[in-house]
Image (tube, coloured by chain):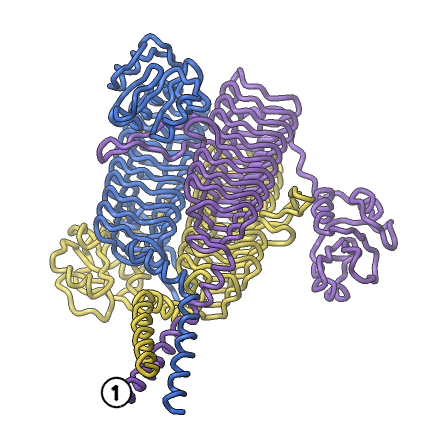
Chain colours: A blue, B purple, C yellow
Amino acid sequence: MTIVTLKELADRLHCRLEGEGSLPIRDLRPLEAAGPEDLALVADAANFSRLAASRAGAVLLSETLPPVDRPALRVSDPHLAFARALALLHPLPDALPGVHPTAVVAPDAEVAPGATVGPLSVVESGARIGADSVLVAQVYVGAGVRIGTGCRIYPQVVLREGSLLGDRVILHSGAIIGADGFGYARDGARYVKIPQVGRVVLEDDVEIGANTAIDRATLGETRIGRGTKIDNLVQVGHNVTIGEDTVIVSQVGLSGSARIGSRVTLAGQAGIVDHVTVGDGAIVGAQAGVPKDVPPGAVVLGAPAIPHLEFKRQLAALARLPELRKAFRALETRLTALETRIDG
Amino acid sequence: MTIVTLKELADRLHCRLEGEGSLPIRDLRPLEAAGPEDLALVADAANFSRLAASRAGAVLLSETLPPVDRPALRVSDPHLAFARALALLHPLPDALPGVHPTAVVAPDAEVAPGATVGPLSVVESGARIGADSVLVAQVYVGAGVRIGTGCRIYPQVVLREGSLLGDRVILHSGAIIGADGFGYARDGARYVKIPQVGRVVLEDDVEIGANTAIDRATLGETRIGRGTKIDNLVQVGHNVTIGEDTVIVSQVGLSGSARIGSRVTLAGQAGIVDHVTVGDGAIVGAQAGVPKDVPPGAVVLGAPAIPHLEFKRQLAALARLPELRKAFRALETRLTALETRIDG
Amino acid sequence: MTIVTLKELADRLHCRLEGEGSLPIRDLRPLEAAGPEDLALVADAANFSRLAASRAGAVLLSETLPPVDRPALRVSDPHLAFARALALLHPLPDALPGVHPTAVVAPDAEVAPGATVGPLSVVESGARIGADSVLVAQVYVGAGVRIGTGCRIYPQVVLREGSLLGDRVILHSGAIIGADGFGYARDGARYVKIPQVGRVVLEDDVEIGANTAIDRATLGETRIGRGTKIDNLVQVGHNVTIGEDTVIVSQVGLSGSARIGSRVTLAGQAGIVDHVTVGDGAIVGAQAGVPKDVPPGAVVLGAPAIPHLEFKRQLAALARLPELRKAFRALETRLTALETRIDG
């Protein structure tokens, strides 16, 4: 942790300073836990109401919230400033550049000056690791893999042969990049493996969560676009393509050759059927099952997924279905009574 | 495997011995597979009916079942005695205490006497490993991690920096403890990473399954309470808290800041939305999707999850919906006929 | 990559050669990407219509498709020939037989001549690795594990003690074979671990995907039958048995003691409840939840899963439920009007 003054923070985060700028700031903490040398985020009106009870030395809040009783940083987007303040106060631990003596690096692999290959890692023939990239420990880098600059690869990540990473890519522990896609031909009742000889491309600023699997393509590429963020335990099948700035939440499954656009959100545990296209800016709800194309900007829910308003209408109708059945029986009785009277 | 007599087992498991106590017991096996030196569990009446055909030398069964034709251990809870008998007959393999010469341990890490750091493990600066804890092999222990006593960490587990483990914690292979939570601020269309600077706390007697991911908190803690058992491939998001003696079955997903009580059961593939509270003793069914708080003791099913009786009523109504539509058409026809007669 | 002539490919794939056989073939590529020395698969009529625009030097296609304007390989099953052609043109990288100096191998483990134990792997006491099997790197092989011949174990796979693998088994990175099953007895509110002392058996030609977990049995075996293919992130609980030539797609969950037949297909994210039997040749749809036995050959969908035709009928009825409610209200109004006229 680094200690800075509130004034320094204001300058570096482009916030407007209210009050005493010489206050030393040790950390960012939640309102309830913050002390006199901590900055606390006041994210919204609910937070604001709890401010009086907080011991926080200073607060970070929106320009639109009322005056406060202590030094403050004012900014139009406090969440963004919060992210940047955390990065300033908690810089990543320094990695010792160079190749750890216990790492096994092929003679023809290239490790750029300033890059780190941590203990017990394996770097195979022809791999190239860019400047300032860090393989923390126990990483596997297959033959011919190329890693850009400023990447961070956490312990026990596997990059199978030929994978291509841009700059500033982050891979969390247990992520498996470039394992074989799931493809077989039939030979009578038996399955014959279709060799998976394509590769995976992760563009700049992609982040991949723990224990997520991104399969290599059968032929060609599985490609994740710039700035896309993928959570833990996600499955990305072979030949999938994903656009830029898309967010994929934990445990989502993308079957082979699915095409996901840019600025899409796929919520937790959703599943996308193979060869389906999800258009730019679409939102797929949690646990949705998507069997056919989703237009750009659409919001879908359910399994099979349908437009969210339709889903909610069906859900409401289903909730009242037992009552409808009852009302139907009553109507039937009334009609029978009427028929009897007329016939009787 | 250890060999003991039936009498010794009776004494150590606090069972009542029926018949010959000098019988040597080599193993616990299923009724069908057991031989003359094996003990077999007779769990219930269905098992009991298959006992005559079994070659088992002795049986373990409830006090409430009828007399049997061979030596027996009687006890009020035979499942619990079965668990304890297995532990006696199959003690964990001895681990050679000390640090394996191929492990990479920081000079300022502390490995207690009696603890084992297995081959090709990495223990970073400031980490502390308690007495009788075993890192089997290829484990990663990040900076400042603290591991209590009597823990067992299977091969290829990752403990990211600052994680805190109580005593007797068991972590299965592929478990990732303390990877970054999934948090971003927006900067226009782009996402900016919110550094995840909190930690993970696993209290005493927690067990975590293979390839499960427990994310570190953004600020503060992700905490799993004493005695809670988590199966394989489960996702626990940042800042989640889980109480004591809770059971979470495979492939469940808990979104950020979910609060799960004590003695809760979450069945397989269920998903809990962020910030939702599940009360003590509640049961969430398999594949349920929980978008809002669940009261203590409630049993919910479906996606979105509703009380289980309501779910079953809706399900039954849905099954009969095609028939209701047909009955509706018939009623419509009868009404039209009646209208025609009256008007005609 | 190997270069062969079209004639050589025809001979080795048992295809009928049309046109010039001396054409050198460098690679198999999609129609759009193929050049004059590439072979392209024309899988169906849709592909065929795009053939004219392709620069592919030669094509692989069905005997039943019309004549083409360039050299061709004709065969009854072009997908199967495609799989075999890829294997010819992209042989697996050679592994250097023998034990890498950084591997940690117990003195009494047996590594057959021709087998490879890659860097930073651990092979425990009594393990046996058959001829031509390759442990690529950083693999863990527990005590007493037996691996047949011609297996390929990718980096960072864990095989816990006692696991038994047939021949030609492929395990992808992050797969955990033989972790403890999820079993506990109750001791009041607390859970007591039931030691899991059985094993996992993977028969010949099984392939297991990245980050998939196959739990060892409590007693006895968890068994995956010959030729069965399992995708990434699948959970197979303790004591599950799976037949031959079955396909299990990503993120499926099989609870303990489930029995899956031969030639079954379980689509993505489906879940099978414990002790349930799925009969030979059955198909379980994506995201289905299977709470009870599925007969051989059945096709089921939904959660809880029902026969697929019934599911589709219910789904259609649900979609028209809001309209049915409306029609019901109209009918009610007409009946009330009729009652009023008769009474009036």
Q: Nearer the viewer, residue C206 or A241?
A: A241
Q: For this view, does C161 lie left or right of residue A155?
A: right
* Outermost bottom residue: A344
- Is B193 left, or right, of A56 in this rendering? left
From the viewer's perspective, is B153 left or right of A89? right
At x 51%, y 45%, the residue is B232
The chain that hosts pointer 1 is: B
Tally of numbered tags: 1
Residue A63, position in %: x, y? 26, 24
* Left or right: B143 as drawn, with respect to C43: right
Residue drawn at x 82%, y 61% as measured from the top left: B68
Measured as percent of width and height from the top left, residue A147 is found at 30, 31
Could you tell me the amino acid type at mark 1? Answer: Asp
Nearer to me, C205 or A136: A136
Front-most of residues C296 and B235: B235
Q: Which residue is mark 1?
A: B343
* Quarter where residue C325 is shown: bottom left
Mark 1 neighbour class, 10 Å CA radius: few under 14, some 14 to 19, many 20 or more: few
Vertical order, C274 against C129 (above or below) = below
Q: Position of residue C183 (x, y in %)?
A: 61, 48
* Residue lying at the far top of the rendered structure: A22
The vertical placement of B150 against C285, above or below, is above
The residue lying toward the viewer, choosing from A229 and C282, is A229
Q: Residue B11 sits in which quadrant?
A: top right
Q: Which residue shows up at 55% across the image and 62% down it?
A: C276
Residue B228: image quadrant is: top right
Q: Which percent across, then down, holds residue A64?
A: 26, 26
Residue B105 appears in the rendering:
yes
